[in-house]
């Protein structure tokens, strides 16, 4: 498989994309002169104000180093020693964080099988029978991913319904928003509308998958949860001494709607890809295309042929399901070149 600059555009992950020029410019601007460390700098203060503009006046933002760290810091404030987290069995905290929730937080993950990566209110209710039983870990948090790990998006009404059941039973609602921008762009709504206004208590706001170099944030939406985050961020090794460079990236994404522009473009490229395979024999979509992810089922020989030319992940080898991701810098030509290769591989 080819590597380096001669390699075609990757469809494996939006993490493979480069950095948006505006974000690079923001990093460069922050690199002029000295500034106080550990977030006591003007870039971080600017970001904190932008968080309030984007998520609501009570929102508090804490820049961190990566998405898994954002999840751990936020969840650490939400759970106690004998608590449990209800989440889909496909959740990132289950499958891609090496057991960090169990190891670092000491909590039980109550996983729920889903059809498309999304919980429904009934899934929460079904896990509440153990409440008050000393022999069982106690449900305390519902954690959802927006976008889900299967590329699907919760609607605003669906999130509100989950929040209503959670809050009505003394639980909190956490959102892994590694691709929150893509979900908001798909739904055509603001960041506040998709989180604060529908009852989310804590969100991990992703920037790295949307044009940043390395920038994520814990955004606290329930004021009573904010007090301990600064301490937990430090204890969890997620407080960068030169926080200004993380904050500058996040600030650039939140300025002039760049987060939305990048996400909407990535979504449009996935839509172009999905539409382009609609009439290809032997290939079918596995899940609705509601973000910058396309999950498709295709023959093994086609997968093998395509992976000799393009990078992408096989999601379920037993059923021939692959995941194709687009990014802010994916172009129509990139997609069309990939489609041509797909058609050729499928007809072989």
Image: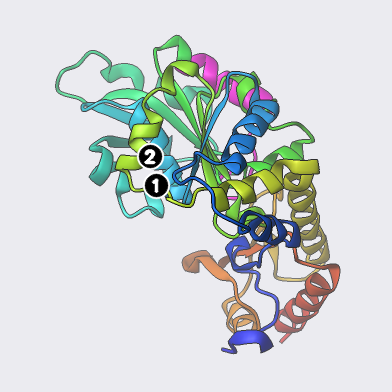
Q: Is residue 182 visible?
A: no
As for residue 156 lying within the magenta part, the answer is yes
Describe the element under mark 1 as helix, strand or loop. loop
Rendered-image quadrant of the N terminus: bottom right
Toward the viewer: 262 or 312? 262
Mark 1 crowd level (few <14, some 14–19, many ≥20, 10 Å Cα):
many
User: Quick one: which residue is furthest to the left in this view?
Assistant: 135
Toward the viewer: 348 or 9? 9
Query: What residue do we see at 60% from left, 86% from top?
Result: 4
Q: Is residue 97 left or right of residue 318?
A: left
Toward the viewer: 62 or 207? 62
Mark positioned earlier in the residue sequence (1 or 2): 2
Find out whether the residues at labels 1 and 2 contact each other: C-beta distance under 8 Å. Answer: yes
Q: Is residue 104 above or below residue 337?
A: above
Query: What residue do we see at 75% from left, 57% from top?
Result: 22
Q: In the rendering, which numbered label is found on residue 238? A: 1
Describe the element under mark 2 as helix, strand or loop. helix
Q: CA distance from mark 1 to mark 2?
A: 5 Å
Rendered-image quadrant of the C terminus: bottom right
Which colour scheme appears in the figure? rainbow
Query: What residue do we see at 55% from left, 41% from top?
Result: 41
Residue 276 horizontal/vertical position (percent): 82, 65
Which range is magenta?
148-166
Residue 119 horizontal/vertical position (percent): 51, 33
Toward the viewer: 336 or 180? 180
Q: Is residue 85 above or below residue 286?
A: above
Residue that numbered label 2 is attached to: 233
């Amino acid at each position: 498989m080819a590597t380096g600059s001669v390699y075609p555009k990757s469809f494996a992950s939006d993490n493979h994309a480069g950095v948006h020029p505006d974000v690079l410019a923001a990093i460069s601007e922050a690199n002029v002169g000295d500034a106080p460390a550990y977030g006591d700098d003007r870039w971080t203060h600017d970001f904190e104000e932008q968080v309030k503009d984007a998520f609501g006046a009570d929102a508090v933002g804490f820049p961190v180093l990566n998405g898994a760290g954002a999840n751990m810091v936020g969840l650490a404030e939400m759970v106690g020693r004998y608590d449990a987290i209800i989440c889909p069995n496909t959740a990132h905290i289950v499958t891609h964080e090496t057991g960090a929730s169990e190891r670092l937080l000491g909590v039980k993950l109550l996983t729920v099988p889903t059809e498309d990566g999304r919980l429904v209110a009934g899934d929460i209710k079904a896990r509440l029978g153990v409440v008050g039983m000393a022999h069982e870990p106690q449900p305390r948090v519902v954690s959802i991913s927006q976008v889900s790990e299967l590329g699907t998006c919760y609607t605003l009404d669906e999130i509100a319904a989950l929040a209503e059941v959670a809050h009505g039973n003394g639980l909190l609602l956490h959102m892994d928003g590694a691709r929150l921008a893509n979900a908001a762009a798909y739904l055509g709504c603001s960041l506040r509308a998709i989180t604060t206004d529908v009852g989310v208590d804590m969100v991990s706001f992703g920037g790295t998958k949307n044009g940043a170099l390395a920038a994520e944030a814990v955004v606290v939406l329930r004021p009573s949860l904010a007090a301990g985050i600064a301490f937990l961020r430090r204890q969890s090794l997620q407080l960068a001494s030169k926080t200004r460079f993380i904050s500058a990236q996040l600030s650039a994404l939140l300025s002039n709607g760049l987060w939305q522009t990048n996400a909407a473009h990535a979504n449009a490229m996935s839509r172009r890809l999905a539409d382009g395979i609609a009439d290809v024999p032997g290939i079918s979509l596995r899940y609705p295309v509601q973000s910058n992810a396309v999950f498709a089922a295709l023959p093994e020989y086609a997968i093998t042929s395509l992976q000799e030319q393009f990078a992408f992940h096989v999601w379920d080898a037993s059923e021939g399901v692959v995941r194709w991701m687009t990014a802010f810098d994916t172009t129509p030509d990139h997609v069309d070149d990939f489609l041509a290769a797909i058609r050729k591989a499928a007809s072989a």
